[in-house]
Image (spheres, rainbow, N blue to C red):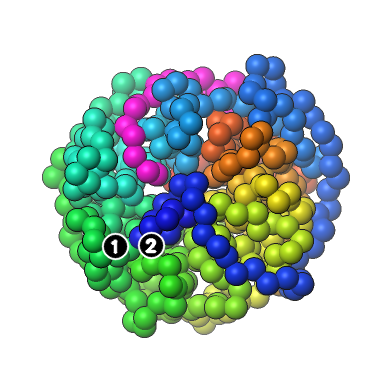
C-alpha cells in the first residue's frame, strides 16, 4: 500500500496515491472464469466483515481465525505468511502470531508476539524467524516506539519453542526493510533486503538508494548477523518516479536465479554467488505497470509472473474503468535467458468503488506439468488462475467477501498454497483457510513441503 512519504511508496498504510488509470482497454489473455458463483455462510462467531463470502463451486472456506489479541487493534493489520511443518506464521503490524495447522480445518493459536512496526513481513528458517521493519523507530527492540526515529531494518527471533518465541538480535539497514528474501547457503543464511527510498531528510534513509542490501546470518550465531554487501543491481536508471530500490525479490536458489520487482523495473538476476548477484536483464513497461511489486517463477524457471500494484494497494483498480493490463499480472517467458512478455491476467470480476483491489502476494499451486497460481487481490479476494498458456491465462477459482463495513483498507494481503490448502492472511478478518477441489489442482495434494517461504522458491 501507499503512504504519504516517497520512500513509503509501498509502506502499507491507509493513505492513498492518485493513479493514472486510463479506461477502455482490454488485456490480452484476460478471460471469464470457468466457474459459477455461490454464496456460503461463514463459520459461527465471526465478525460482521466476514459474515458472507462468495466462491466458485470448486473453492470452500473451511476455517477462519479472527486476528487475536493483542494483534487486533485498529492499526494492527495482518500482513505476510510463512510456514514450517505443522505451523503457520502470520505477520501483523502489531507483531506476529503462530498457529498450529496440523488440522487445517481447525487451526489453533499457539502464541502471539507483540512487536509493533510496519510491516512485519515474516520468514522462517530452522529455529529462526525474521521480520522486516520498514518504519523508523527509536530502537531495535520490540519495546521501541517511533520516538527519535533512528533505527529500522531486520529483527531476528528464536522460534525453537513455538509457544514462547524469543527476540535475539537486529540488523539496521538503510531505509529499513520493506520485504526480505532468504538465500540459504550451508550454515549461512543470506537475506536480500528490499526497501524503497531515499528520503532526503531522514536519519535512516539518506540518498542515494539505488541498491539492495545483503545481510549475512550465521545460523549458529545469529546474534552476529551483519550487512556484507550493498550491490547496485541497476545498470540503468530506474523508470519509477515513486522510489528507488526494490519492493520484492524472489530467489530460486536451486536454479541460481532471482527475479526482482523494483518499482519501475523488473530485473532477472544470476545469484550463483549470492553475495554478488549479477544482472541478466532489466525490463520495464511504462504503458501498463506503475509499481512493479513482486515476482514468481514457474516450477521449471522458464517463466516469471510480475505483478503491478497500481495505486499502492489503497485504490479500487479492479473496476470497469481501469484497463485490464493495469494493476494486473504480466506473464513473461524466459527464452534464451531473456524475458519475453506474453500475456496479462487480472481478475475478471469487477469490484465496487469502495473496495481496494489490485494484484498482490501469491504462490504456485504445485501441479506437475502445469503453471497454476493462487494470489491475493485485497478486497478482490483470492484468485486461482492457470498460466500454462502464457498468452491466455485464465481464472479457475476464487473466494471473496463483500465490501468491508465502514470502508477503508481490507481484504487478502497474501494467499499461499501449503500442503493441500490455501491460507489467506486477511488484513482485517484474520487467517482464512480455503480448500480447492478441482481436477486441475488435485495433483498438488500429493506434494508435501517441510516449510515454505514464498520469496524463496523450491522445486516440487
Q: Around disc 2, counting alpha carbons within 10 Å, would you say few (fewer than 14), some (14 to 19), or many (20 or more)?
A: some
Labels 1 and 2 touching (C-beta < 8 A): yes
Query: Could you say which disc has been placed on residue 46 in the image?
Result: none
- How far apart, in angstroms, are the residues tagged by discs 1 and 2? 7 Å
Write the residue at 69% across / 56% down.
Answer: 318
Query: Could you say which disc has been placed on residue 199 in the image?
Result: 1
Q: Around disc 1, counting alpha carbons within 10 Å, would you say few (fewer than 14), some (14 to 19), or many (20 or more)?
A: some
Q: Along the polypeptide, which appears first: circle 1 or circle 2?
A: 2
- Is 335 left, or right, of 441 in this rendering? left
Residue 343 visible, this orientation: yes
x, y percentage for residue 257?
41, 67
Callout 1: helix, strand or loop? Answer: loop
When asked about the image quadrant of residue 387, the answer is bottom right
Write the residue at 22% across / 46% down.
Answer: 149
- Is 92 left, or right, of 197 in this rendering? right
Callout 2: helix, strand or loop? Answer: loop
Write the residue at 33% across / 49% down.
Answer: 134
Residue that label 2 marks? 6
Is residue 36 within the magenta segment? no
Of residues 102 and 459, the one nearer the viewer is: 102
Is residue 103 within the magenta segment? yes
Magenta stretch in the rendered image: 100-119
Amino acid at each position: 500500500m501507499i503512504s504519504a512519504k516517497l520512500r513509503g511508496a509501498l509502506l502499507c498504510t491507509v493513505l492513498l496515491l492518485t493513479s493514472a488509470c486510463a479506461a477502455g482497454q482490454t488485456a490480452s489473455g484476460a478471460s471469464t472464469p470457468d466457474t459459477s458463483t455461490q454464496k456460503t455462510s461463514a463459520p459461527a462467531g465471526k465478525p460482521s466483515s466476514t459474515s458472507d463470502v462468495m466462491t466458485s463451486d470448486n473453492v470452500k472456506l473451511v476455517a477462519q481465525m479472527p486476528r487475536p489479541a493483542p494483534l487486533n487493534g485498529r492499526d494492527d493489520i495482518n500482513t505476510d505468511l510463512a510456514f514450517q511443518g505443522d505451523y503457520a506464521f502470520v505477520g501483523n503490524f502489531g507483531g506476529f502470531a503462530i498457529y498450529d495447522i496440523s488440522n487445517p480445518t481447525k487451526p489453533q493459536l499457539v502464541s502471539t508476539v507483540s512487536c509493533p512496526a510496519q510491516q512485519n513481513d515474516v520468514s522462517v528458517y530452522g529455529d529462526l524467524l525474521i521480520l522486516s521493519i520498514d518504519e523508523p523507530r527509536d530502537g531495535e527492540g520490540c519495546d521501541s516506539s517511533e520516538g527519535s526515529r533512528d533505527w529500522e531494518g531486520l529483527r531476528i527471533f528464536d522460534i525453537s519453542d513455538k509457544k514462547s518465541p524469543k527476540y535475539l538480535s537486529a540488523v539496521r539497514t538503510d531505509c529499513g526493510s520493506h520485504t526480505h528474501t532468504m538465500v540459504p547457503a550451508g550454515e549461512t543464511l543470506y537475506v536480500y533486503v528490499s526497501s524503497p527510498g531515499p528520503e532526503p531528510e531522514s536519519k535512516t534513509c539518506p540518498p542515494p538508494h539505488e541498491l539492495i542490501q545483503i545481510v549475512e546470518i550465521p545460523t549458529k550465531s545469529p546474534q552476529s548477523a551483519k550487512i556484507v554487501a550493498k550491490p547496485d543491481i541497476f545498470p540503468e536508471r530506474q523508470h519509477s518516479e515513486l522510489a528507488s530500490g526494490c519492493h520484492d525479490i524472489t530467489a530460486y536458489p536451486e536454479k541460481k536465479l532471482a527475479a526482482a520487482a523494483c518499482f519501475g523495473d523488473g530485473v532477472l538476476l544470476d545469484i550463483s554467488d549470492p553475495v554478488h548477484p549479477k544482472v541478466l536483464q532489466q525490463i520495464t513497461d511504462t504503458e501498463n505497470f506503475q509499481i512493479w511489486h513482486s515476482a514468481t517463477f514457474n516450477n521449471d524457471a522458464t517463466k516469471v509472473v510480475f505483478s503491478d500494484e497500481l495505486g499502492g494497494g489503497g485504490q479500487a483498480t479492479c473496476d470497469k474503468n481501469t484497463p485490464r493490463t493495469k494493476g494486473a499480472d504480466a506473464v513473461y517467458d524466459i527464452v534464451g535467458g531473456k524475458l519475453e512478455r506474453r500475456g496479462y491476467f487480472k481478475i475478471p470480476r469487477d469490484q465496487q468503488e469502495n473496495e481496494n483491489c489490485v494484484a498482490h502476494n501469491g504462490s504456485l499451486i504445485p501441479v506437475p506439468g502445469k503453471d497454476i497460481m493462487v494470489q491475493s487481490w485485497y478486497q478482490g479476494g483470492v484468485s486461482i488462475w492457470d498460466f500454462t498458456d502464457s498468452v491466455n491465462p485464465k481464472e479457475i477459482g476464487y473466494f471473496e467477501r463483500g465490501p468491508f463495513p465502514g470502508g477503508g483498507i481490507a481484504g487478502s494481503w497474501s494467499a499461499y498454497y501449503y500442503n493441500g490448502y490455501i491460507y489467506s492472511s486477511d488484513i482485517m478478518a484474520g487467517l482464512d483457510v480455503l480448500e480447492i477441489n478441482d481436477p486441475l489442482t488435485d495433483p498438488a495434494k500429493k506434494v508435501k513441503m517441510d516449510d515454505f517461504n514464498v520469496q524463496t522458491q523450491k522445486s516440487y
